[in-house]
């Protein structure tokens, strides 16, 4: 006879629960645990922006209390919670209390900083706070300085133009007004703030700086008059250059170095501060500054020999010599995949094009780097100079023309469509003229429009942007039909479009409505002309657009 006895299985107890005192400790532990869970749930409700109606006031008081609320949570838990917040929300949350601020600037939460700063005194304390907290450990830092164009509208004085009865001395006084000098002075202070904060950062891997062209230049060249008034003895400029070299010499993990239009921050000796170990592992190098006097360059072919691991390079075109092309074809260098070149009329005036690579150099470079793609930005370059620059063997993928004085000819557009039909994907044509009544016509005295031929020959064309050149409505329709849905972006300003007299004479059809309908049908997506040119940076800020596109072009490998 078998007997089945039901024996109770002892349940595990918390430590110390066998005695009456231990049971009391367990009860207190459980009460504290429940309180912590309630506080955590209240914290999460506040972070989501949906506190319950009955607990709204109590939740806020608990979060700000020192003995209860967020302060009683472990720092690791707070860091984990705030890791799900975007960067702007983290900065707002850091103003709540000192404990949150300490947790929110934990290095793991800020691996990268991308800042776009207005050149304004109001930005300086905020920048100082952010860089003081993050500058010593951030791994990727990108800073863009954005200033208003104070030279437009007659000068930076009071925002208005000079009186027609005033003389040249009064106009000059407006240009040298206190407001303009304050902007330039603030710009130098902001640059110093950024460089001082990262001077001892050995974790920095990506460092990118962009300076606004309207602050740095006037009519294409640096206005030393303003700079001499702000920094008469040159101490701040020298300090900025020394800090930049100190950052390079202290870096141990730098892979990406990009500097564009930064007011002489880079000198011909700056790169010598990099150690050989860092130079040998550098993957991207961008040095864009057309204000270097004389024939001096920011990097020489001898210096380039140290950068054996470069995947992308961005330079002034006059600095990219035939000797550099030969260095990049050496067997000890990895194949270069992205090359961005800035062709500026200031550089062409002060430097020579005689040392640029010829077609044989480009062929050798293309054989070495089969995936090499080139991006060219041309500022006010004459047609005869462009004919020298555009060698047939350049694997040109993107080209951007920006003109203020000179105009691109139809022959240049036709040459580009013939030579680079297998590579070209982006074509931007801009002419920033004041008189909108006389746009140049690329198809003048031609049987076929060069832009239509460009769309027909370049089968990979995905972006076409035009402003300041006359584009006939029927040619725009032809471009849309030729490229179809492969043309992802077609930006043409309204004032650039013109209509045939026959289209305007037809009373039964609205020419504008017909244009929008036909182009949309050809592209396979809704389309309309650009009504407000200020809404597109490609037209209003060509330097900034080029710099950002160059960054993405170099990263897309």
Image: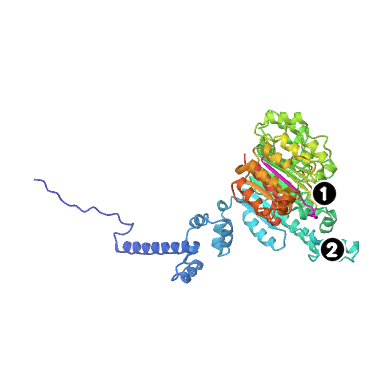
* Label 1 neighbour load within 10 Å: few <14, some 14-19, many 20+: few
Residue 246, position as x, y percentages in the image = 72, 47
Count of marks, rendered view: 2
Disc 1 is placed on an element classified as loop
The residue lying at 69 percent from left, 46 percent from top is 476
- In which quarter of the view is residue 271 placed? top right
The residue lying at 34 percent from left, 64 percent from top is 27
Towards the viewer: 425 or 496: 496
Residue at the outermost left position: 1
Residue 493, position as x, y percentages in the image = 71, 52
The residue lying at 45 percent from left, 64 percent from top is 42
Q: Is residue 202 visible?
A: no
* Label 2 neighbour load within 10 Å: few <14, some 14-19, many 20+: many
Question: Quarter of the image containing the C terminus?
Answer: top right
Residue 326, position as x, y percentages in the image = 74, 30
- In which quarter of the view is residue 178 placed? bottom right
Towards the viewer: 468 or 484: 484
Question: Quarter of the image containing the N terminus?
Answer: top left
- In which quarter of the view is residue 420 placed? top right
- Taking the image as shown, residue 132 lies to the left or right of residue 501, namely left
Towards the viewer: 319 or 465: 465
Question: Which mark is on residue 253?
Answer: none
Disc 2 is placed on an element classified as helix
Label 1 sits on residue: 405
Towards the viewer: 201 or 282: 282
Q: Which residues are magenta?
A: 424-437
Question: Which mark is on residue 174?
Answer: 2
Residue 527, position as x, y percentages in the image = 63, 51
Q: Is residue 130 visible?
A: yes
Whether 460 is drawn above or below 83: the answer is above
Question: Does the stretch in magenta take in 251?
Answer: no
Q: How far apart, in angstroms, are the residues tagged by discs 2 and 1?
A: 24 Å
């Amino acid at each position: 006879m078998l007997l089945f006895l039901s024996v109770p299985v002892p349940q595990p107890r918390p430590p110390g629960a066998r005695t009456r005192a231990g049971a009391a400790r367990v009860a207190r532990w459980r009460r504290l645990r429940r309180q912590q869970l309630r506080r955590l749930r209240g914290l999460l409700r506040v972070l989501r922006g949906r506190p319950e109606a009955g607990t709204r006031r109590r939740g806020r008081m608990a979060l700000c209390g020192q003995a209860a609320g967020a302060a009683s949570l472990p720092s690791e838990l707070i860091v984990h919670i705030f890791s799900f917040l975007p960067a702007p929300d983290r900065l707002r949350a850091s103003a709540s209390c000192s404990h949150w601020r300490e947790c929110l600037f934990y290095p793991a939460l800020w691996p990268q900083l991308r800042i776009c700063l207005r050149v304004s005194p109001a930005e300086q304390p905020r920048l100082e706070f952010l860089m003081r907290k993050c500058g010593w450990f951030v791994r990727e830092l990108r800073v863009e300085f954005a200033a208003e164009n104070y030279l437009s509208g007659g000068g930076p004085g009071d925002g208005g133009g000079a009186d027609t009865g005033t003389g040249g001395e009064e106009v000059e006084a407006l240009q040298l007004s206190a407001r303009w000098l304050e902007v330039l002075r603030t710009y130098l202070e902001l640059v110093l703030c950024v460089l001082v904060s990262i001077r001892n950062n050995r974790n920095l891997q990506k460092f990118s700086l962009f300076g606004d062209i309207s602050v740095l230049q006037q009519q294409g060249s640096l206005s030393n008059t303003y700079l001499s008034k702000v920094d008469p003895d040159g101490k701040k400029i020298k300090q900025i250059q020394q800090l930049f070299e100190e950052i390079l010499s202290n870096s141990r993990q730098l892979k990406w170095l990009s500097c564009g239009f930064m007011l002489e921050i880079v000198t011909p000796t700056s790169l010598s501060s990099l150690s050989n170990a860092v130079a040998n592992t550098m993957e991207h190098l961008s040095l864009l500054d057309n204000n270097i006097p004389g024939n001096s360059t920011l990097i020489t072919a001898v210096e380039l020999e140290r950068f054996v691991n470069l995947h992308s390079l961005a330079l002034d075109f006059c600095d990219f010599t035939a000797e550099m092309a030969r260095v990049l074809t050496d067997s000890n260098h990895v194949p270069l995949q992205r090359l961005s070149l800035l062709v500026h009329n200031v550089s062409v005036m002060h430097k020579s094009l005689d040392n640029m690579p010829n077609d044989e150099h480009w062929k050798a470079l293309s054989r070495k780097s089969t995936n090499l793609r080139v991006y060219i930005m041309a500022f006010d370059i004459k047609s005869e100079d462009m004919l020298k620059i555009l060698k047939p063997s350049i694997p040109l993928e993107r080209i951007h023309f920006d003109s203020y004085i000179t105009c691109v000819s139809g022959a240049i557009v036709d040459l580009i469509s013939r030579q680079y039909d297998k590579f070209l994907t982006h074509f931007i044509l801009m002419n920033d003229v004041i008189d909108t009544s006389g746009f140049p016509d690329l198809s003048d005295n031609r049987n076929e429009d060069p832009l239509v031929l460009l769309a027909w020959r370049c089968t990979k064309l995905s972006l076409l942007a035009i402003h300041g050149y006359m584009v006939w409505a029927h040619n725009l329709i032809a471009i849309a039909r030729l490229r179809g849905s492969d043309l992802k972006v077609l930006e043409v300003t309204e004032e650039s479009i013109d209509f045939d007299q026959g289209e305007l004479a037809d009373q039964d059809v609205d020419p504008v409505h017909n244009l929008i309908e036909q182009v949309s049908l050809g592209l396979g997506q809704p389309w309309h002309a650009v009504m407000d040119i200020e809404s597109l940076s490609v037209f209003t800020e060509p330097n900034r657009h080029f710099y950002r596109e160059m960054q993405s072009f170099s990263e897309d490998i």
